[in-house]
Image (tube, rainbow, N blue to C red):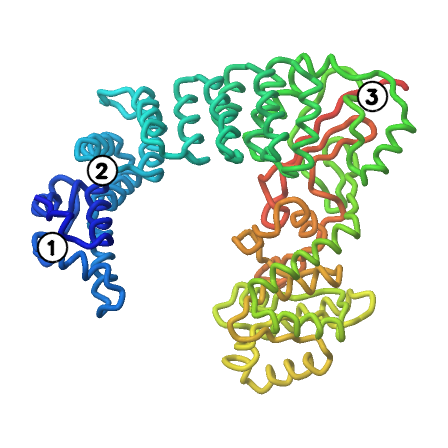
C-alpha cells in the first residue's frame, strides 16, 4: 500500500504521485527487486537498495525534497532513477539492440505495457530499429506487423516521433518491398517539423530503383534536392543504374555529371554500372553525329576544363576498357591527354578562412593566433612539411636525417630556393633525438632561417601544417591521407580537390630511401573530352603503390 498522500506536504505528494505514474509506486516494485534478474535481465540489485525501497516513507519523501539537507536527496534521486523501471527497460532494450534480439525486446515491451511502465521516444525507436532489421529464420511473428503496431501505439501514447523513428519505419516498409509507403512516411516528417536526412530517403529511393520505377525514383531525388539533402555515391549509382535499365539516356548523362561533381573517383560497384551503360545497345544509338565544335570549346573553358555538359557526342558503339594513365596524364588506351582542372582562387581563400575558424575553435585560440602572426612574418612558403609524418616514415625512432634530406631536396626544386616550413610538435624539438648535437644544430639552423615552427604543448599539429600550406597556396609534404574526423569537418567538396593538387607523398624503397611523389599534372576526376570521350577514375590503385585503374570509353568520331 502507498502511504496516504494526505499526510504529506504538497511537494512530497507530488513526488509520490509521479512515482505512481512512472512505476506503479516504488513500494510495489520494491517487492519485485528480488526477481529483477529474471524479469529484466538485470545483473545485480543491491540489497541496500531493496531495504531502502521497503522502508520508503513520508519522512523519506520529505528528506528527498529537502535541498538544504546533507545531500542525501540527490544521492537518493540518482539511485531511484537508476533503478526505476523505465531506466531498466532502456538498459535491456539497448542490450537487445546490440545483440539484434527482437524476440526478447518484444517480450520486454509486452511486459512493460502490462506493468504500466511509460515508454519514451528512445524505447520506441529501439523497438522499431529491431523490427526493421533483416528477419532471421524460425521467427514466429511478422516484423512488419509488429513494427507498425508499435508505431501506432507510439501515437496512442502521444510520444512524439523524430527523424530516427520515421527512418526506421521507412526501412520496415522497404523490407516489405513497399517503397511508396516508405516515401509517404518521409513526406509526413514535414508535418512533424522534422528535417529528413540522407538515410531517411534510402528505403524509398533504393526500393523504387530496385523495382525499375524510374519516375518514382526521380521524384524522391527531386524531394531530396528540395529539402537540401545531397545524394552521395550509393544514391547516384542507383539512379544511374535505373536510368540505364530503362534507357533514359538524358538521365544517365545527368547522373554521370553529378558523379563527376560529387564523387570524383568511383567505387567498383559504380564502375560496373558505368561499364554496363557504355556496353549497351542504347548507348551506341544516342548522340549527335555533328556538333558545334566552337561551342563545345567555349563550354569547356567556362566550366574550368574537363567537361562540357553538351550531351552525348558522336554515334556508334562504344569501346570500353580498363586502362591507366602515364605520369603526364596520357591515356594508355586511346592516347587522350587528361587536363588539370583549375581551382578558383576565391575558393582557396574561403577554404583558408573556414580552416582558420575551425582551428581556432579546437585549439587554444591564442596559440593559433600566434602561429598566424608568425606565418605572416615568415611566409609564404613554397612547401610545408609534416615533420612528424616524415621523420617516422619507415622508422621506429624519429629520424632527423630523413627530414633533412627531404627538406634539402625541396629547397633544390623550389623556384625561390627557399627552405620549406617544417612543422613539429614542441616535444619533438626539445627531447629524444632532438638532444643529439647534430640534430640540435640542424634545428637551430631551421629556426634561424624562419623555417621551423614548434607547435605548443597540447595542440594538434595537423591544423598548423594544413593551414600553412593552404594559406601559402603551396605544396604539402605528408603521407597522412587526412581521412580522420578532423579532416571530415572540412567537407568533401573542395578539400579533396585541394589535396589532389597540393599533396606531395613519400615513396620508400630500399635502394633510394624516401622519394617525393609529386601531385599529378592532371585531375583525377571523371573527364568528358571535346571529342566525346569519357575517362572515369576508380578507387582501385592509388598511383603510389599501384597504378590507378581508369575506365576509357571511346567511339569513332564521324566527320563534322
N-terminal-most mark, 2 or 1: 1
Q: Nearest the camera: 2 or 253?
A: 2
346 versus 147 height, above or below:
below
Q: Give the image location of residue 400, x and y in percent.
A: 59, 75
Q: Confirm whether residue 174 shows in the render.
A: yes
Mark closer to the observer (2, 3): 2
**Alpha-carbon span between mark 2 and mark 3:** 73 Å
Residue designated by label 1: 57
Which residue is label 2 attached to? 117
Expressed as whole percent of the image width and height from the top left, the position of residue 331 reads 74, 36
Which numbered mark, 1 or 3, is in the foreground of this view?
1
Point out the residue furthest to the bottom here.
437
Residue 236 in which image quadrant: top right
The label on residue 557 is 3
Q: Quadrant of the C terminus?
A: top right
Residue toward you, 1 or 86: 1
Quick one: quadrant of the N terminus? top left
Amino acid at each position: 500500500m502507498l502511504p496516504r498522500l494526505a499526510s504529506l506536504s504538497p511537494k512530497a505528494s507530488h513526488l509520490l504521485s509521479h512515482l505512481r505514474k512512472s512505476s506503479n509506486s516504488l513500494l510495489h516494485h520494491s517487492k519485485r527487486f528480488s526477481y529483477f534478474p529474471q524479469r529484466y535481465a538485470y545483473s545485480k540489485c543491491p540489497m541496500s537498495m531493496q531495504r531502502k525501497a521497503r522502508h520508503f516513507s513520508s519522512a523519506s519523501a520529505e528528506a528527498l525534497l529537502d535541498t538544504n539537507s546533507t545531500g542525501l536527496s540527490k544521492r537518493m534521486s540518482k539511485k531511484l532513477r537508476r533503478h526505476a523501471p523505465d531506466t531498466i527497460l532502456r538498459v535491456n532494450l539497448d542490450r537487445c539492440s546490440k545483440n539484434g534480439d527482437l524476440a526478447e525486446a518484444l517480450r520486454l515491451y509486452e511486459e512493460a505495457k502490462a506493468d504500466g511502465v511509460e515508454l519514451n521516444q528512445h524505447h520506441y525507436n529501439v523497438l522499431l530499429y529491431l523490427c526493421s532489421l533483416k528477419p532471421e529464420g524460425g521467427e514466429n511473428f511478422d516484423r512488419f506487423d509488429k513494427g507498425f503496431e508499435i508505431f501506432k501505439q507510439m501515437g496512442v501514447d502521444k510520444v512524439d516521433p523524430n527523424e530516427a523513428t520515421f527512418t526506421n519505419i521507412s526501412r520496415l516498409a522497404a523490407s516489405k518491398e513497399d517503397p511508396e509507403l516508405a516515401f509517404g512516411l518521409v513526406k509526413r516528417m514535414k508535418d512533424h517539423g522534422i528535417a529528413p536526412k540522407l538515410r531517411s530517403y534510402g528505403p524509398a529511393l533504393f526500393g523504387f530503383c530496385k523495382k525499375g520505377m524510374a519516375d518514382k525514383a526521380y521524384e524522391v531525388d527531386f524531394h531530396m534536392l528540395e529539402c537540401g539533402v545531397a545524394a552521395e555515391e550509393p544514391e547516384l549509382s542507383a539512379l544511374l543504374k535505373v536510368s540505364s535499365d530503362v534507357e533514359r539516356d538524358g538521365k544517365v548523362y545527368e547522373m554521370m555529371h553529378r558523379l563527376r561533381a560529387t564523387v570524383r573517383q568511383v567505387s567498383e560497384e559504380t564502375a560496373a554500372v558505368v561499364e554496363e551503360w557504355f556496353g549497351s545497345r542504347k548507348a551506341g544509338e544516342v548522340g549527335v553525329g555533328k556538333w558545334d565544335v566552337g561551342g563545345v570549346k567555349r563550354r569547356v573553358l567556362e566550366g574550368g576544363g574537363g567537361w562540357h555538359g553538351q550531351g552525348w557526342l558522336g554515334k556508334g558503339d562504344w569501346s570500353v576498357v580498363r586502362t591507366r594513365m602515364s605520369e603526364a596524364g596520357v591515356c594508355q588506351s586511346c592516347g587522350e591527354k587528361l587536363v588539370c582542372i583549375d581551382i578558383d582562387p576565391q575558393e582557396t581563400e574561403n577554404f583558408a578562412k573556414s580552416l582558420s575558424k575551425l582551428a581556432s575553435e579546437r585549439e587554444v585560440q591564442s596559440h593559433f593566433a600566434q602561429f598566424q602572426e608568425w606565418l605572416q612574418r615568415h611566409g609564404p612558403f613554397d612547401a610545408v612539411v609534416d615533420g612528424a609524418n616524415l621523420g617516422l616514415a619507415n622508422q621506429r625512432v624519429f629520424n632527423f636525417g630523413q627530414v633533412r634530406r627531404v627538406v634539402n631536396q625541396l629547397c633544390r626544386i623550389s623556384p625561390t630556393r627557399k627552405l620549406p616550413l617544417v612543422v613539429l610538435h614542441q616535444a619533438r624539438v626539445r627531447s629524444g633525438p632532438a638532444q643529439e648535437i647534430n640534430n640540435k644544430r640542424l634545428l637551430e639552423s631551421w629556426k634561424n632561417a624562419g623555417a621551423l615552427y614548434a607547435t605548443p604543448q597540447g595542440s594538434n599539429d595537423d591544423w598548423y601544417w594544413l593551414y600553412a600550406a593552404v594559406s601559402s597556396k603551396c605544396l604539402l609534404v605528408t603521407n597522412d591521407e587526412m581521412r580522420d574526423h578532423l579532416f571530415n569537418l572540412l567537407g568533401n567538396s573542395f578539400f579533396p580537390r585541394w589535396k589532389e593538387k597540393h599533396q606531395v607523398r613519400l615513396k620508400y624503397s630500399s635502394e633510394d630511401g624516401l622519394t617525393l611523389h609529386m601531385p599529378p599534372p592532371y585531375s583525377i576526376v571523371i573527364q568528358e573530352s571535346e571529342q566525346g570521350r569519357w575517362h572515369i577514375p576508380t578507387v582501385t590503385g592509388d598511383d603510389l603503390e599501384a597504378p590507378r585503374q581508369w575506365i576509357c570509353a571511346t567511339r569513332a568520331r564521324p566527320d563534322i
